[in-house]
């Protein structure tokens, strides 16, 4: 194999190299659809259960499914022999990120932009920030791992450990952080989101 071909295989492809542009384009298209073709989001909003979008859940599954097909499940045992990455991920996701997200959101919504954002709206924004900050992005971990040619078995173990922690930690952390700010989120929504 020539050196040029090896470099092409080792480097990022066009999709991976310009991922930021694709994401920006998708955001712009999504905003345009919401603004100019509102029937699409209105229709999709009808398929919610406890404020959880069923179409989004299906699309997330379709996004990670190709990655799941590439996992050699016998190599998962070896992933447990490298606990440093899993430990770092868990500490970041559960002891740092939710509280940092709350602090940053509170600072900007209730201090920096207090005069620009009504208090009720600021509470809603804070709730959204806390929900995002407390939820480790498991689906995108698979995508990023695949894009960077990472170890799919190790990725699966990291995601599985985080998913197990989600089952017991997500709802109480979110309820605590939102309760501190007097924001009410129904437990049914938190549990179903989990």
Image (cartoon, rainbow, N blue to C red):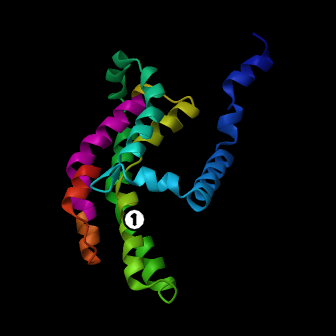
**Bounds of the magenta segment:** 154-174
Residue located at (43% from left, 28% from top): 65
Q: In the displayed image of the protein, which residue is found farthest to the top?
A: 1
Residue 171 higher or lower than 64, as above or below = below
> Is residue 100 visible to us here?
no
Q: Is residue 157 magenta?
A: yes
Query: Can you give x and y, in whole percent of width and height, for residue 89 in the image?
Result: 38, 46
> Is residue 182 visible to us here?
yes
Query: Can you give x and y, in whole percent of width and height, for residue 41 in the image?
Result: 48, 54
Residue 112 higher or lower than 36, as above or below = below
Q: In which quarter of the image is residue 120?
A: bottom left
Residue 151 higher or lower than 109, as above or below = above
Q: Is the magenta stretch mostly helix, strand or loop?
A: helix
Name the residue tied to disc 1. Answer: 128
- From the viewer's perspective, tell me whether residue 164 is left or right of residue 75: left
Q: Quadrant of residue 6?
A: top right
Residue located at (47% from left, 86% from top): 114
Residue located at (31% from left, 35% from top): 160
Query: Can you give x and y, in whole percent of width and height, for residue 84 in the image?
Result: 38, 39
Q: Does dot 1 land on a helix, a strand or a loop?
A: helix
Residue located at (35% from left, 65% from top): 99
């Amino acid at each position: 194999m020539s050196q040029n071909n090896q470099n092409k295989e080792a480097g990022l492809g066009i999709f991976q190299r310009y991922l930021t542009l694709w994401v920006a384009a998708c955001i712009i298209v999504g905003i345009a659809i919401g603004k100019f073709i509102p029937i699409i989001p209105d229709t999709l909003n009808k398929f919610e259960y406890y404020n959880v979008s069923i179409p989004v859940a299906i699309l997330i599954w379709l996004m990670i499914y190709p990655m799941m097909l590439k996992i050699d499940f016998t190599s998962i045992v070896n992933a447990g022999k490298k606990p440093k990455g899993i430990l770092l991920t868990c500490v970041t996701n559960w002891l740092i990120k939710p509280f940092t997200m709350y602090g940053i959101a509170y600072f900007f919504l209730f201090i920096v932009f207090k005069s620009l954002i009504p208090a009720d709206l600021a509470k809603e924004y804070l709730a959204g920030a806390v929900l995002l900050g407390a939820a480790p992005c498991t689906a995108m971990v698979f995508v990023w791992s695949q894009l960077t040619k990472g170890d799919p078995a190790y990725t699966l173990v990291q995601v599985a450990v985080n998913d197990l922690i989600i089952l017991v930690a997500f709802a109480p952390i979110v309820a605590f952080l939102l309760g501190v700010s007097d924001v009410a989120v129904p437990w049914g929504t938190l549990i179903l989101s989990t």
